[in-house]
Image (cartoon, coloured by chain):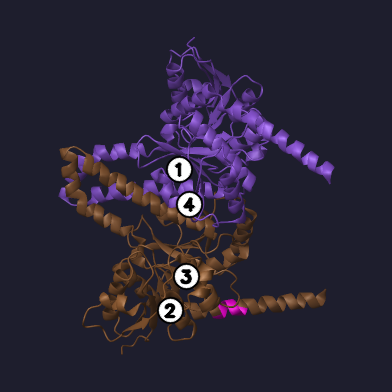
Chain colours: A purple, B brown
Amino acid sequence: MAETSKWRIAVDGMGGDQAPAEIVAGAVEAAHHFPDVEIQLYGDESALRDHMPADLPTNLAVVHAPEKITSEDEPVKAIRQKKGSSMVMAARAVKSGQADAMLSAGNSGALLSSGLLIVGRMKGIERPAFMAALPNLSQPGDNWLLIDSGANSESKAKHLFQYAQMGQAYAEQVQGKSFARVALLNNGAEASKGTEVLKAAHQALSQNQAINFTGNIEARDVLSGQADVVVADGFTGNAVLKSIEGTASQVMKVVTDALKNGNLSTKLGGLLIKKQLKDTLKSMDYNQVGGALLFGVKAPVIKCHGTANAKNIFYAIQQAIQVLDVEVVPELATRFAEDFKREKAAQSEQDKGE
Amino acid sequence: MAETSKWRIAVDGMGGDQAPAEIVAGAVEAAHHFPDVEIQLYGDESALRDHMPADLPTNLAVVHAPEKITSEDEPVKAIRQKKGSSMVMAARAVKSGQADAMLSAGNSGALLSSGLLIVGRMKGIERPAFMAALPNLSQPGDNWLLIDSGANSESKAKHLFQYAQMGQAYAEQVQGKSFARVALLNNGAEASKGTEVLKAAHQALSQNQAINFTGNIEARDVLSGQADVVVADGFTGNAVLKSIEGTASQVMKVVTDALKNGNLSTKLGGLLIKKQLKDTLKSMDYNQVGGALLFGVKAPVIKCHGTANAKNIFYAIQQAIQVLDVEVVPELATRFAEDFKREKAAQSEQDKGE
């Protein structure tokens, strides 16, 4: 065993468009690459074994799960009724302490419900949020964080404030950024912009010395890396995430189509720049940096893209290990529990005074 | 005078990053191109004349405005205090019937306030909305409409329903689409997705036979032309608009930088495809189709991009003429006034019954 701790990662082998083949391949690769980490693969045993090599790494465990949650399943109902599903079993392994983290490329709503109802919220956190890492297109290799990227359709100012705390902790502890810049997604730079919730969040963030709050950021500026953490309500965050995804892929498609359908010199030019274009596309692939972390639950729960392939699964497992290594989740849990206790005490003092 | 009606378009000559030079140039070009339309250019007379050719078209009128609203001005205050500003004078010309439509590339908030407070809302419309036309990247030359692209930070279901009516009327009457497909921007396809407001709007749109409602649309799909009209609350619509803008320009920058900084063959390839790339960029430039129309006020008010150049101003003037030609604004005003009367009557019947 190396100096690092040994972690156990529960992987939903049946979730996602390319399951189980690509999930198995990613898990096997991760097991080879991280010999001191145990990878637990949940799913239909015979389906999983069909995609496994003969010489299985000893740190890869297969756990049979007779059921499967599909993308059509209604999330909460699925979690309650399909107790033998790969996703629910992986979540229960985390809950019972048999695993330290879990990941899935399956039904996002069901994964969110697994996090909230099985793994459980941290004390003091009302609304766990999804946090996605996206590329800073001005500086290859750098990423910025979008939180909430889609867990909640409505948020209060207090939730947004907690997203900022979680995002900052991740940027500093997992990504190693010092005094990460935190911005609030809004429709204008001025403090007076946006909804009442955003105005209140802006004020709370401005007044807190522990947060390096740089003010509002507009959606057109997020990709150029002006902030390390972009805080948004989950509805807008999700819309922005999907706009970015859709626009990047559509624009690249227009460019590559233009090259394909152009005249001879355009085609020749296209051939010459093909490799460069490919590298460009790769630098924009945010799956390379893992999945969306469900932040605010008691252990790391990672949502991989529905289209995740082996490489994405590998990166998401690597991300889970990084999050576990720096112990950011237990540290935040302690901090939020203390904040909660302090608020409760202040509230009770106030009640007495009245 | 040709068969078309003669319209008078009030142009704010002092608004925008490139004012007055580019605004004047665009107005002059439009005056030449549309000899039966009067272009009224509002602004500091000597500043405007500095950029004018000696042989001014006779259908271009200069109206001196001693003041100017800047991008730093607080919108409502500016409208109230700077009565001699080019923007307010243009809006008052519309209000008094001296002009039929107005456009400005200046302070968006102030233009919105000019529309609401000077030009005035249509009867029965609580929340006028900005409507922007964006490119369908799957079909060059086609556009889809985003309404509200940023006038209101919060919307009720009834407002969203009216945006759908306005968007559909524009798509059918101005763009000539028959039975335009209307979709609701949401974070999932199912009717049960999103906030309570979105669920209520979904239900109202589904139940109305006059609207070709195709259900929810996610932000990742808007650019591929799956809907002709995308209805959104102004906060999300604005975030999506700016995400698309920002992503498209950042991705194109990454591509062109990659070509510039590549090796010799990449550079050669880049040279060969330069023209094609330029055409591609052009097809994505939504300024080509005019500006954002403030819909729900008594006359066409068009917001041009802050960076608008002469060509953009020309297209926005052309757009104003098209909107006036089909008489979509008075027609909608009549329709909304009737709806309003009917609702009032129903309400009063109900009150009597109680």
Q: Which residue is mark 1?
A: A227
Q: Nearer the viewer, mark 4 or mark 1?
A: 1
The answer to which quarter of the image holds residue A288 is top left
Is label 2 on the same chain as label 1?
A: no
Q: Main secondary structure of the magenta part?
A: helix
Distance from the alpha carbon under mark 3 to that under mark 4: 27 Å
Query: Would residue B215 be visible to someone looking at this image?
Result: no
Q: Is residue A302 left or right of residue B157?
A: left
Residue that numbered label 2 is attached to: B90
| Residue at horizontal 41 percent and vertical 45 percent from the top | A223
Judging depth in this view, the residue of A342 and B254 nearest the camera is A342
Q: Are marks 3 and 1 in contact (CB under 8 Å)?
A: no
Label 4 lies in what chain? B
CA distance for labels 2 and 1: 39 Å
Disc 4 is placed on an element classified as helix
Q: Chain of mark 1?
A: A
* The disc label shown at residue B111, or none: 3
Q: Earlier in the sequence, mark 3 or mark 2?
A: 2
Q: Nearer the viewer, mark 2 or mark 4?
A: 2
Give amino acid for label 3: Leu
Verify CB contact (< 8 Å) between mark 2 and mark 1. Answer: no
